Amino acid sequence: MGDGVEDAAAVEEVERWFLSRGLPHFIEDYSASRDVFTRALPALILVLLLEMLGALNFAWPWWLNLVVGLGGFAALVTAWALVNRLRRRPAFARPDRVGAPEIGVFLVVPSALPLIAGGQLLTAVNTLAANLLLLGVIYLATSYGVVPMTRWAGTRLRAQLGALLGLMVRALPLLLLFVVFLFLTPELWQVAASMDGPFLAIAVGLFVGLGVLFVVGRIPQEVGQLARFDDGGEVAALVAGTPAERLRTGTGDGTGDGTGDGTGPTPPATLGRRQWGNVGLVLLFSQGVQVAFVSLMIGAFLVVFGLIAVAPDTAASWVGGDVDPLVAGVLWGRGVALTVELLQVATLLAAVAGFSFTLSLLTDRAYRQEFLHDVVREVRQAFAVRAVYLGARRQEGG
């Protein structure tokens, strides 16, 4: 297969390639303690230091707060040293792996300090709950590569920006007509104006949730098709230009996964639960970015259209009461106002339009060809890279 050092370097480059596309679970032996919380250790330390302020009480004299602060810092350093000694490391060494003991320190120490220092039970409980939530967010965001996934989806969105704008001109006339018709309905203004606070968020969330459910329901079918290759030549074409191209030689069957002879169709790649979730999240996220962009554009159009077409007096008569203007003025002798009610109507209709666009992406072949072709190809390319990568890892292990 060539020089082992070069092959190992190529494998590492492929793993970084997976990370850059939001597919960290395609990396073999991906570990939460080694690859997630350890990478987030500097942020966890900063949070620990800030939460030590929770043990202070501004009603106390300054010197007492100073004593409590120094005591809390000493307790944190002591816990750090004990964990290191239990792992047979130097007392003040930086952990090379964040596991259960380090997570325990992060949860227990900052929540115990307010309780010990001043009997602040509520502060202690809130700190513990906040740290549990923070760990969950860090794990999900880091484990599933949310930041690189966002960059990747943003790059795809910029590449498709012209196509998306073209879609709103060519492929959505009926949707825009339907939305504008509803926008000029007094009953909709009354309903939207009555949705104060969380009610509007819940209504929008219902449409978002339904759209997510429909997309998630299609993901197993999508992934099954993307992970199957006709022959080794298709795999070679897909990995061209990727770090896995350096690993092609010597993978034996031409597919790199050892499941075919390199000439006929190969079975779908075997995926674990986290890998299913990872690739499904990439597909869901990429489609979500497109839907969100279209919804924002329609919402912005409705706000501009409402400023021009719906005078404040008309809006007041439609909602059956006074409107709440945020910005008001006079344009060409006519009053115009950006009202809370206008924003509520535009938000509700943007959610409806986004839901309709989601259904079109799932069911209309022309929409899928135009807007999901590049995303689907890149995910399929990731499966091809993974097949070659697994073959190289097996040979490396052998």
Image (spheres, grey):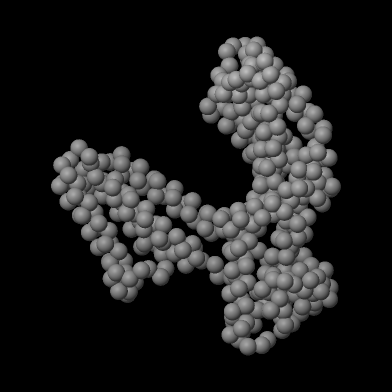
Look at 29% across and 69% down and name the residue there: 92
Task: Determine which quarter of the picture holds residue 102.
Answer: bottom left
When the figure is inspected, residue 296 is found, relative to residue 52, above or below; the finding is above
- Residue 35: percent from left, percent from top: 50, 65
Of the pair 251 and 57, the residue shown nearer to us: 57
Q: In this view, which residue lies farthest toward the bottom?
A: 3
Residue 234 place in picture, x, y as percent:
80, 70
Relative depth, front residue between 261 and 383? 383
Is residue 10 in sight in this rendering? yes
39 vs 205, nearest the viewer: 39
Residue extending farthest to the front is 332
Quarter in which the N terminus is drawn: bottom right
| Side (left or right) of 264 relative to 73 | right
24 versus 187 height, above or below: below
Residue 210 appears in view:
no
> Where does the image place residue 288, in percent across and percent down from the top left?
66, 46
Residue 228 image-quadrant placement: bottom right
Q: How many marks?
A: 0
Q: Is residue 173 above or below residue 53?
A: above
Q: Give residue 381's position: percent from left, percent from top.
A: 73, 65
Quadrant (top left, top right, bottom left, bottom right) of the C terminus: bottom right
Q: Is residue 15 above or below residue 53?
A: below
Which residue is located at x 37 percent, y 68 percent?
A: 95
Q: Residue at x 41, y 61 (%)?
A: 41
